[in-house]
Amino acid sequence: MIYSSELIKGTLKTIVLKLLADNRKMYGYEITQRVKEVTSEKIQITEGALYPTLHSLENEGLVTTETEFIGKRIRKHYMLTKKGKQSTKEKVNELTDFMNTLGFLLDIKLKSA
Amino acid sequence: MYKLTEEQIDFIHSDIAKRGIALESLRNDLLDHVCCIIENEYDGRTDFAIFYTEVIKRFYKSELKEIQEETMLHLTFKNYYVMKKIMIYSGAFTAFTLIIGSFFKIMHYPGAGALFALSIFTASLLFLPLNFLLKSREEKKLLDKFIIGSGFFAFMLFSLGILFRIQHWQGAMYLWLAAFVITFLIFIPMYFVNGIRNPEKKTNTMVFTVIIILAAGLQFALINVHPAKRQLEMKMYGYLQNEEILNRLKEDHSGTEKKISESAMGIYSTCEELKKIILKNNAGVEVLPADFEKQNLLLEEGNLGNDFVPNGKGNFAFKRLLEEINVFNSNVDEKHQLPVKNSILEADMEKLYSYSNYFVLNSLTQLQMMILL
């Protein structure tokens, strides 16, 4: 089962930040592949969602980039800034808390149904 | 792993650009990403162009440009909160200055006009445009954005028109006219037709349309279109005639030997000073020109206003005038004294601001005439 894009949308920033925290620096293709690998292809990040998110994180000052020239093309490696590291912790905590709450909420609803 | 040639990379790069990706950094990201996919998945047996087309299709739903639009949306999202904050603060500031300004106006404190001007200025040039930018972002269809835009623009012109009017700047009528034309010929028809088709918005649309028409109609009812203007012109002619008599007296006087005492000249120039203050306040000019109609200038009938409240500069000048007249009258025989009875010179100084501007202007000119007679 592949999760719907609506579900992924709200958590994409946190997923990307956490991956960057664990891997120091990554480029776009690498991020999509790593997520696919780790989640046994259950979560597939589309390019259409990934790049807007990466650029937005860069604009917010949470990530910074390092360019590498590969022949005629440029590869941008994304990595966390100091502010980004702090924000990752907060976002991961928030998401964990949210998942617990959600579990609790859905559990109650299931029982009552 | 497949190795891409330089030509193939150039081809991909120009294709991405052709598909409307103008942000360079995003273009580089996508180029590298496409290259990575091809390197990992292409076996070199099928046609490269066909394979590339299949790969690039994965990036979008209907066209590649979507990624750029989404990126732009993300990048401007940060400004969204700043804009929203400025909008809220400017809105609060507008309301606050308007309320304080109204209070000052009722109490006849100086500065009411400035507060109103500041308030309308903030509303028209900060609060309303920001409100439009934020609201239009919520609407997806271009038509809806346009309708909202025309409504906000008309409202902006309308409030600027009021600002121009109270400041006696040229062009207030044109701003109002433009606001009315946009409201009735563009905004209301489009808003109504567009909204009434949508079952969810139908009732709201009808109610809101009636409210706008009602508000515009009430505003229109407050404007005296033609007759009042004629009456006002007659009053202006009357004042200008007085000025003309004064000018002729002045010319006659310069030819004769008759001397005017220094204290009388003092009174004459204080009158001149007072008239300038009144005209500046009520018509925006210091001297009313004879061709006021051509210049589209109107001297509105009203009270003397804030310069004449106790401690206002007009009030001070008026007190000086009274003192000068006292000195003058005590030094001449009764026959040559300037008449004080039944004139503005008997005015209650505490309530000087509430006297009619036309009455005071004419009285001052008549006083000047008496000095020259």
Image (spheres, coloured by chain):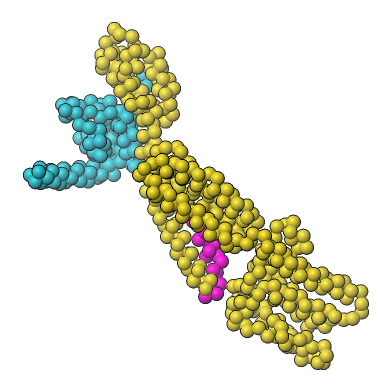
Chain colours: A cyan, B yellow
Residue shown at 55% from the left, 54% from the top: B158
Asked if the magenta segment contains residue B129, the reply would be no
| Residue B156 % position (x, y) | 52, 52
Q: Is residue B249 left or right of residue B302?
A: right
Residue shown at 69% from the left, 81% from the top: B344
* Residue lying farthest to the top in this orientation: B45
Specify the quadrant of the image occupied by residue B350: bottom right
Instruction: Indicate whether A100 appears above or below A46.
Output: below
- The residue nearer to you, when weighing A33 against B179, is B179
| Residue A75 % position (x, y) | 33, 26
* Residue lying farthest to the left in this orientation: A111
Instruction: Indicate whether B240 appears above or below B59.
Output: below
What is the magenta range? B107-125
- The residue nearer to you, when weighing B230 against A28, is B230
| Residue B273 % position (x, y) | 71, 73
- The residue nearer to you, when weighing B23 against B97, is B97
Instruction: Tell me if residue B317 can be seen.
Output: yes
Asked if the magenta segment contains residue B110, the reply would be yes
Instruction: Tell me if residue B280 can be seen.
Output: no
Which quadrant does the C terminus of chain B fall into?
A: bottom right
